[in-house]
Image (cartoon, rainbow, N blue to C red):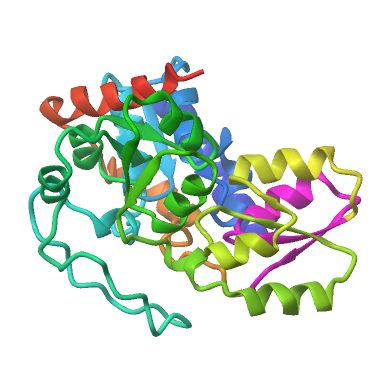
């Protein structure tokens, strides 16, 4: 750790105490941001934890929808997102009643798949197309989309959530790969939105074969946001928290990690005797990496950027989250 990093971290700790705040960092954040956080984890896990802590302020080092979730569950606390431009392209691929935005191309991902629905298609359009079919919203969605949905899910509990619903059909939004993974594990018909994570979608089956060739003794862990052909070649398909649990409990000593490279920091911290290799070295989310120690200091000093979900959206969005949490 450099002297500059140490000084910044010391200042953050002082400001945190002055503000009676807690710092949350997603598993994909920069290592130095994870190191200064009070809690590191998945987005919903962090928001649920924050709701139980006696504090006045939550500084969420993540992306916009994560800070919204914290606001939904802790409406009495000030929620700050240090970098207001830290968004989630996948979450932006679906809107309640306004056209989708025009997508930019990402470095190393020059040919995104065609969309099933035309650009003007919205969540309310698909509800009209399939009347009475419940909508399952991945937590990687905006508060507005959650409020328009019947129930939320995570990458870990999507199948349980689908199985908990009446009828033989569900609409899953917005990640098509997670939806296809769920469809393989339920008898229900899953109607999938055509969204995707630009980090996970770029991985191919050939990437898995190359990684196995480079590290023949390693187990392949893949996030269900990856393409089906990638999941077919993995040894274990699970969420980021699932990867952490699997690595701790497994007798294997080497792992190829098929998710955003930020998770490698925590994997190595928790398993210093084991080796971890990125499935692709460019599995990096630029939005997750926007937040820096200086961003956090600015957030504390200037109270930026406050994220507050309006009550007419927060209440129905919380109901969708609560329904998910009630699923056993």
Residue at 50%, 39% (x, y): give it: 186
Quadrant showing the N terminus: bottom right
Q: Can residue 300 be seen in this view?
A: no
Residue nearer the viewer, 209 or 50: 209
Q: Residue 188 appears at what percent x and percent y?
A: 41, 39
User: Would you place residue 281 above or below residue 177 in this image?
Assistant: below
Q: Can residue 322 be seen in this view?
A: yes
Residue 269 is a magenta residue: yes
Judge from the rendering whether residue 74 lies leftward or rightward of residue 219; answer left or right.
left
User: Would you place residue 114 above or below residue 183 in this image?
Assistant: below
Q: How many numbered discs sit on the rendered protein?
A: 0
Residue nearer the viewer, 15 or 293: 293
Residue 198 is a magenta residue: no
Which quarter of the picture shows residue 38? top right
Residue at 47%, 47% (x, y): give it: 183
Q: Residue 288 appears at what percent x and percent y?
A: 46, 58
Q: Residue 52 appears at what percent x and percent y?
A: 46, 16
Magenta residues, as a range? Answer: 254-280
Q: Residue 127 appears at what percent x and percent y?
A: 15, 43
């Amino acid at each position: 750790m450099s002297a500059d990093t140490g000084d910044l971290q010391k200042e953050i700790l002082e400001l945190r105490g002055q503000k009676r705040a807690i710092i949350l960092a997603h598993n994909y954040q920069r290592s130095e941001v994870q190191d200064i956080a009070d809690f590191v984890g998945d987005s919903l896990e962090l928001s649920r934890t924050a709701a139980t802590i006696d504090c006045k302020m939550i500084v969420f080092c993540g992306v916009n929808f994560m800070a919204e979730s914290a606001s939904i569950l802790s409406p009495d606390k000030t929620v700050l997102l240090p970098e207001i431009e830290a968004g989630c392209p996948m979450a932006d691929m679906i809107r309640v009643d306004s056209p989708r935005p025009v997508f930019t191309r990402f470095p190393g991902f020059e040919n995104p798949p065609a969309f099933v629905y035309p650009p003007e298609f919205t969540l309310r359009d698909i509800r009209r197309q399939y009347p009475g079919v419940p909508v399952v919203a991945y937590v990687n969605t905006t508060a507005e989309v959650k409020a328009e949905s019947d129930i939320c899910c995570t990458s870990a509990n999507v199948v349980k959530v689908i199985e908990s619903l009446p009828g033989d059909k569900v609409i899953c939004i917005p990640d098509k790969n997670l939806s296809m993974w769920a469809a393989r594990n339920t008898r229900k018909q899953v109607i999938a939105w055509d969204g995707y994570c630009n980090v996970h979608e770029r991985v191919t089956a050939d990437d898995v074969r190359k990684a196995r060739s480079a590290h023949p003794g390693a187990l392949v862990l893949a996030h269900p946001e990856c393409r089906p052909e990638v999941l077919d070649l993995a040894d274990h398909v699970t969420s980021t928290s699932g990867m952490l649990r699997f690595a701790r409990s497994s007798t294997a000593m080497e792992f190829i990690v098929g998710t955003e490279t930020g998770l490698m920091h925590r994997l190595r911290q928790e398993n210093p005797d084991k080796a971890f290799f990125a499935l692709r070295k460019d599995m990096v989310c630029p939005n997750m990496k926007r937040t820096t120690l200086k961003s956090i200091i600015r957030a504390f000093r200037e109270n930026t950027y406050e994220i507050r979900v309006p009550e007419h959206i927060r209440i129905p969005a919380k109901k969708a989250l609560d329904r998910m949490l009630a699923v056993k």
